[in-house]
């Protein structure tokens, strides 16, 4: 996906209301007469709200992954240009030099001892100067803006994922979509061997195989994957982003 793609989305609150409304409507389906539902879906197996949400989730997932790679590249440039904001503080009593990266470090090391007031003032000035260089380079490169864009996209993706997992599927394709999304959001790396990911992959393969046998022309999420999806993990987890082979 090209990093320059422009994607227009609804405000997050509006999107969430729409998704919640969809969830509430579809959750009521199992309470209706089964024959009515079957008649509605007859001749139109693609009419599955879960499958529709899977398509929306996948687009959001790939878009967020592209934005993640973009902000990572910009961060690498920013760090290479000015380095993470920091300052060196020499502690005379211990005759050691310590690197600090935020004002709280200086407070913890030196406190308000008048004997080291000059050292503290110099450390604060050095850190502030480095932070100013970082901020200037950040504005030039657009790193913080890209990071905010990724965070907004990730929030939208999570909204769609939550709606998908709470929406009853009305076809095997919808069930496959749920399992596929759970795998991509949950497993730490491709073909993770930790429980329950091998079991979920096995269940997805079963659903795809049965669905294709019953309806050879029906689209089954998970069946089209030729290689690992683009991946990224938030909240401090390790980032593993798949790069598409050249020419793909």
Image: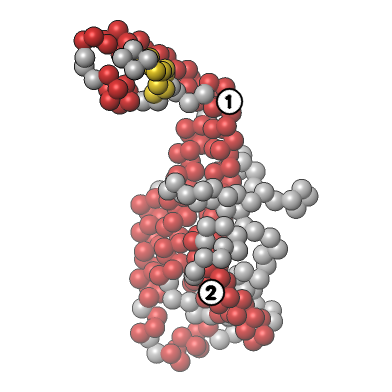
Q: Nearer the viewer, residue 22 or 161?
A: 161
Tell which residue pokes out farthest to the bottom in this image.
35
Residue 192's image quarter? bottom right
Q: Which residue is mark 1?
A: 80
Measured as percent of width and height from the top left, residue 59 is found at 56, 56
Tell me the colour scheme of the image. Answer: secondary structure
Q: Is residue 181 visible?
A: no
Number of residue marks: 2
What residue do we see at 66% from left, 71% from top?
A: 223
**Observer-nearest residue: 172 or 192?**
192
* Residue 199 - label: 2
* Circle 1 Cα neighbour tier, 10 Å, few/some/many (<14 / 14–19 / ≥20): few
Front residue (pair 53, 142): 142
Q: Residue furthest right?
A: 247
Q: Label 2 crowding class (10 Å Cα cut-off): few <14, some 14-19, many 20+?
A: few
Residue drawn at (52%, 29%) of the image: 142
142 to 186, vertically: above or below: above
Left or right of 14 in this view: 214: right
37 left or right of 242?
A: left
In percent of width and height, residue 242 lies at 64, 51
Q: What x and y, as percent, mark residue 48?
A: 52, 75
Which residue corresponds to the image point at 58% horizontal and 79% vertical from the top-left? 207
Q: Looking at the image, is 151 positioned above or below residue 124? A: below
Q: Residue at x 37, y 73 (%)?
A: 25
Q: Secondary structure at mark 1?
A: helix
SS of the residue under disc 2: helix
């Amino acid at each position: 996906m090209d990093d320059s793609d422009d994607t227009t989305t609804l405000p997050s609150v509006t999107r969430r209301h729409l998704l919640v409304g969809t969830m509430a409507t579809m959750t009521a389906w199992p309470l209706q007469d089964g024959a009515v539902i079957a008649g509605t879906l007859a001749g139109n197996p693609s009419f599955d709200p879960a499958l529709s949400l899977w398509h929306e989730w996948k687009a959001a997932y790939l878009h967020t992954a592209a934005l993640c790679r973009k902000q990572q590249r910009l961060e690498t440039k920013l760090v290479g240009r000015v380095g993470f904001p920091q300052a060196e503080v020499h502690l005379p009593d211990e005759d050691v030099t310590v690197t600090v990266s935020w004002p709280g470090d200086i407070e913890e090391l030196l406190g308000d001892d008048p004997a080291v007031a000059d050292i503290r003032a110099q450390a604060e000035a050095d850190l502030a100067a480095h932070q100013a260089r970082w901020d200037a380079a950040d504005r030039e490169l657009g790193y913080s803006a890209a990071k905010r864009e990724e965070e907004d996209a990730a929030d939208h993706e999570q909204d769609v994922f939550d709606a998908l997992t709470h929406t009853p599927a009305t076809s095997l394709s919808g069930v496959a979509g749920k399992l596929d999304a759970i795998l991509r959001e949950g497993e730490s790396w491709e073909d993770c061997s930790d429980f329950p990911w091998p079991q979920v992959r096995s269940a997805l393969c079963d659903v795809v195989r049965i669905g294709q046998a019953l309806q050879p022309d029906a689209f089954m999420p998970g069946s089209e994957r030729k290689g690992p999806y683009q991946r990224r993990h938030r909240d401090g987890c390790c980032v593993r982003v798949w790069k598409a082979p050249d020419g793909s």
